[in-house]
Image (cartoon, rainbow, N blue to C red):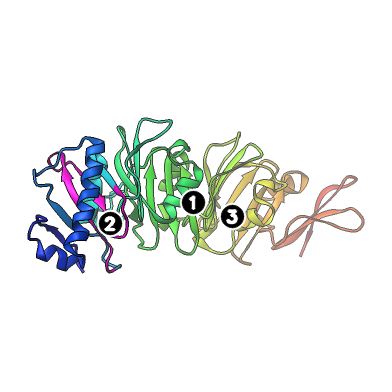
Amino acid sequence: MKNILLALTLTGSVLLHAQSGKSKSKVQDIRNIIIEKANQLNLRPTTPSYEINYQELSNEVNGNFAYYISFTNGTAAIYCKSTTDKAYAVWGDIYKEYNALLLGEPAKTARGTGLVNQKFFLGAPITDEFKTPKKNGAGQHFEGGSIYWSPATGAHEVHGAIRDKWKALGWENSFLGFPKTNEMTTPDGYGRFNFFEGGAIYFHPNLGTFALPNMVIETWKKEGWEKGKLGYPISDEIIKNNNSVQMFEFGAIISSNASKYQVIFNSFRANYGLYTKWKDIGGLDANIGYLVLGNKNYPKLFKYHFAEFLKGFIYENPNVNSAFVIRKGPIFDYYAKKGWETGSLGLPIADEATASDGTIYQNFERGTIFYTKALGAFEAKK
């Protein structure tokens, strides 16, 4: 069912009553409530007769409608539902945005993906407009979401799980600030997102709702957004051990004292690889320390990668569909002398281990490197 917007005077408005299913006396009561509210706010009616209107608010919920009267030459309106005796005013930029959303307004997304259909409905207002407490702006809550405005961002709606996340973080007082877009659909059609001054919130029905700061977004953008190497976010930014990490489906964006916003990921979005191994050994708590160099491809096996950490490396081995840690030290130094993965030993097939006699060893595709204090590093061929 399409929007129905009927602008009819109260006197003799048989059609208005028929459409709303309410008696003339009930409509008169609602009209009086709206006029009383207007007098409190010193709002001037657009028409001297206080013309009352009837607005459908939903395509999906039958009977979800409100009455309203326009004020100040159509730049404000006061709404009252038939199920309540409370009226709320909507005006200024918030009213413009609200009215556009009710009528259906195409709008360009922040990511330049073209025009999208904005025909969804916030329902009726449930508060008047209010000033935001710590920043220069305003907000208003509706049955199905909120619209927030600031001089720098304009007015934009936030609803559903994304609004819940923004609220949990502290609304506009969080690092996100005010919304810069309405909620949009991701290009792959599965997720939803809002951009804010300081970042974005992304929602996926199977993965959850997470906030990303701008610096993480810039790195994620270079990797192809949710359709790229990393997929969708699966965590908020985590700050721990002087590192920050944003976890994604197939990789992570990591910042540390040694490096700013580098990426590790599994090759080909596989369920094994650098990222999976890093998570398996503890992520930010892993005993190989913080990230020094993100994914770097092998010179002769460029589709697969290794990454350097403070105390070791993680190497992908596509031949066994896994990844392994080589700790910095005598075993790695010996491996380097042998030409790394292109040398005689090939790729690792296990992590470093310690034998019962204290000998440290690591298995590779074509041999094993051993280390003892007495003998140093040496090799046994397969």
Who comes first in sequence, dot 2 or dot 3? 2
What span is colored magenta in the figure? 62-87
Side of 62 relative to 379 (left or right):
left
Q: Residue at x 44, y 60 (%)?
A: 204
Q: Give me the disc on residue 61.
A: none
Q: Residue 199 appears at what percent x and percent y?
A: 43, 42
The local crowd at label 1, few if under 14, some if 14 to 19, many if 20 or more residues have their Cα within 10 Å, is many
Res 81 quadrant in image: bottom left
Q: Residue at x 22, y 41 (%)?
A: 38
Q: Secondary structure at mark 3?
A: helix
Q: Is residue 69 magenta?
A: yes
The local crowd at label 3, few if under 14, some if 14 to 19, many if 20 or more residues have their Cα within 10 Å, is many
Q: Residue 139 appears at what percent x and percent y?
A: 35, 41
The residue beneath circle 3 is: 275
Three-letter code for the amino acid on which mark 3 is drawn: Tyr
Give the mark toward the camera: 1 or 2. Answer: 2
Q: Give the residue furthest to the right.
A: 357
Residue in front for this viewpoint, 104 or 33: 33
User: How far apart in space, not on screen, are marks 1 and 2 (Cα)?
Assistant: 34 Å
The residue beneath circle 1 is: 210
Q: Residue at x 12, y 50 (%)?
A: 51
Three-letter code for the amino acid on which mark 2 is drawn: Lys
Q: Secondary structure at mark 1?
A: strand
Three-letter code for the amino acid on which mark 1 is drawn: Phe
Q: Residue 153 appears at what percent x and percent y?
A: 31, 37
User: How far apart in space, not on screen, are marks 3 and 1 (Cα)?
Assistant: 19 Å
* Above or below, comparing residue 56 to residue 326 in the picture: below
Quadrant of the image containing the C terminus: bottom right
